[in-house]
Image: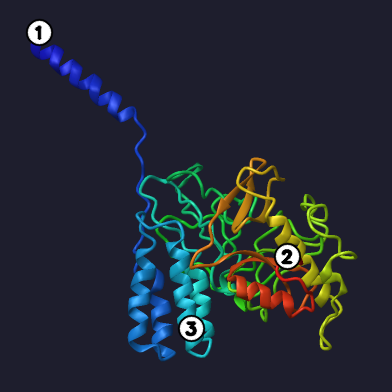
Amino acid sequence: MVYFKKLLAFVIAATAVSAIPLQKRIAQVIADSTADWEKACLAAGGAGQCNPISQTAFTSLLAAGGNCDQQDAADSMIDLAKQLNNDPEMIRLAQLFVQQPRNAPDSLQVPYCQKAPKNTELNGLFHCQFAGSDFTKFSGDQTGNLPLGLSAVNPPGSCPAKPDGPVPDGVQLNTLVSDPGTPEGGNAASGAASVGTGIVSSVTDSIVNASATESAPSVAITTDSGAKGARDVTSVAPAAASSPAAAASAPADAKPFTLQNGLDAQKGNAAAATISAGSSCTDGETVCAGTEIGQCVGGQIVTSACSGGTQCFVLPLVNKAGTSVACTTQDDAAARIAATGATGGITGA
């Protein structure tokens, strides 16, 4: 009888354990993710610089990696490509690498990086998820549930290079597609990328994407003309007609929109001083909140710090009407605004 009771208890326990859903580990051969890039790097003359960057990059796909390690690695890959005569194959493969899914040992979605990339060629690009992921949950602290500047990822698990859906478990993205994709409004391959539909700017209703000749270190957001929900900044910045900047004149070689871009950038930077974490906003809105990039989540601004000694500024575009938001230095922002003919510095004060 004692033996029977013990056996029965064991069977009940085993049945209970079997009823608990098992988490499926989703992994990949991480070295395969940069193998083609390393070959292209060697062919371009990168020699001994190629392998260390390749190894650092593929290890960023491990579950232990930080949310932005993969993007930082892709920036390093493009930095070297630019040193090697802007090698287009290295750049293309880096753009695909930054969209490769990361390992998901808990079968949950991997959070997205919440800072803008250094190189414009990566603007608007973010990693796909593996198809076996639980698309109702994310790993970690839940602060990176949307790519920077986006209000949704549709379909779930997709990315610009694979807009039809997630990547099959364990598969390398560069074996499925060759085109790094086109974020809404721009071409990532040419360095003219925006970050998607539904992004709302705090600066102007006519913001467009930075072109390939824009040299802002890390353009963060753009939006289409007339985007719904744009924050009205005219009430917190001097009106153009009465501000010192309004008396300025555009350079002799300026385009029709050059000076206005500078004035709009000044208004956006002045408005940033009135915005902070927790400020009310419209979902999808992305702004400069003080010195940080702020994204509207659930009706409140959530901030992300810039890196490398930079801070958030609204900058004038050069080749198109509008402005962009970027992490850069104060000197760089001031120089860009002054180049438009606008006076009064970064805020037009």
Q: Position of residue 197 (x, y in %)?
A: 71, 57
First along the sequence among labels 3 and 1: 1
Q: Quadrant of the N terminus?
A: top left
Residue 43 rendering spot, x and y as whole percentages: 41, 89
Picture coordinates of residue 333 (x, y %)? 65, 72
Assess disc 1: are there few (<14), some (14-19) or many (≥20) residues with their C-alpha within 10 Å of its C-alpha.
Answer: few
Q: Is residue 325 visible?
A: yes
- Please identify the quarter of the rendering in which residue 326 is found: bottom right
Name the residue that disc number 3 marks.
Answer: 81
Location of mark 2 (residue) = 347
Closer mark to the observer between disc 3 and disc 1: 3
Secondary structure state at the residue bearing disc 1: loop
Q: Nearer the viewer, residue 291 or 229?
A: 291
Relative to 32, say whether 282 is above or below.
Answer: above
Residue nearest the viewer, comparing 94 with 299? 299
Residue at (52%, 79%) from the top-left corner? 91
Q: Nearer the viewer, residue 211 or 333?
A: 333
Q: Give the residue type that dot 1 points to.
A: Met
Give the Cα separation between the discs numbered 2 and 1. 86 Å
Disc 3/disc 2 C-alpha distance (Å): 36 Å
Residue, disc 1: 1
As drawn, the label of residue 193 is none
In space, the residues marked 3 and 1 are separated at their CA atoms by 75 Å
- For the residue pair 305 and 81, the one nearer the viewer reads as 305
In-image side of 154 versus 100 (left or right): right
Between circles 3 and 2, the one closer to the viewer is 2
Direction from residue 216 to residue 99 in the image, left or right: left
